[in-house]
Image (cartoon, helix red, strand yellow):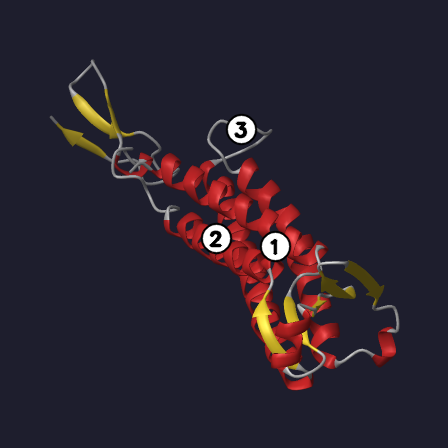
Amino acid sequence: MSQMRRQLLGTAASGVGWVGVIVATATNDWVRTCDYTKTTCVRMDELSSRGLWAECVISPSLYHCVGLTQILTLPAYVQTARALMICACLLGLPAMLLILMSMACVRLQNDTSAVKKRRARVGGVLFIFMAVCSIISTVWFPIGANKEEDLMSFGFSLYSGWVGSALCLVGGIIILCCQGIDPGTPSRDNSFYYSGNRGTATLLDPPANHAKSARV
């Protein structure tokens, strides 16, 4: 697989993962807990859904949410999860911009291959850091919720966060790993041009004070 294809694959995976992290942050179906005993909740078919921003009551005849607006009284795991998920969502924007600007099809003024590689590496590191933030949040939140109440099941928001984190992590690693010299592309360090005057081969970019020539 060529370097360009690997970079496109990593960019696509990271982009989809970023969307998954945003969905997990914006929705409130992270975990479903039971305010009573599990037997009572199953018989009443009533569960509590909890997310970063609200707590909801879910039943066949009722769906009611109460916003978590008392920031100072919230548990530590909720506040930490909020901060990490917001950080992950915000990091996705500069990471994606850096990756897109490192594409071979994008031409900027005074752009070189070394600059493009640096952009891609920074973007890949940002996606990996974003995945780490999201993983910590989506793992710590259900553990904290289970300590307060009986945890019945995970919600779709938590699954979205897990899938998004995994895609961002894999995409960032792929982007970092594809920044070496592509075997199919010749390096300028070993390129020669040939002079028709005396049949000599000279380096394409010779140093200023150390020009080399080889007799052909």
User: Of marks 2 and 1, which one's residue comes earlier in the chain?
Assistant: 1
Q: Amino acid at mark 1?
A: Val
- The percent position of residue 134, horizontal first and vertical second, equals 59, 63
Q: CA distance from mark 2 to mark 1?
A: 10 Å
Q: Which residue is mark 2?
A: 167
User: Of marks 2 and 3, which one's residue comes earlier in the chain?
Assistant: 3
* Residue 215 picture quarter: top left
| Mark 2 nearby-residue class (10 Å; few <14, some 14–19, many ≥20) | many
Q: Is residue 187 visible?
A: yes
Q: CA distance from mark 1 to mark 3?
A: 27 Å
Q: Secondary structure at mark 2?
A: helix
* Residue found at x 67% / y 66%: 84
Query: With 110 as the anchor, is 3 left or right in this view?
Result: left
* Residue found at x 57% / y 31%: 110
Q: Amino acid at mark 2?
A: Leu
Q: Is residue 91 visible?
A: no
Q: Is residue 148 above or below residue 94?
A: below
Q: Which residue is mark 1?
A: 21
Q: Is residue 192 above or below residue 177?
A: above
Q: Secondary structure at mark 3?
A: loop
Report the front residue among 30 and 21.
Answer: 30
Report the front residue among 17 and 208.
Answer: 17
Q: Which residue is mark 3?
A: 106
Q: Secondary structure at mark 1?
A: helix
* Residue found at x 68% / y 71%: 44
User: Of marks 1 and 3, which one's residue comes earlier in the chain?
Assistant: 1
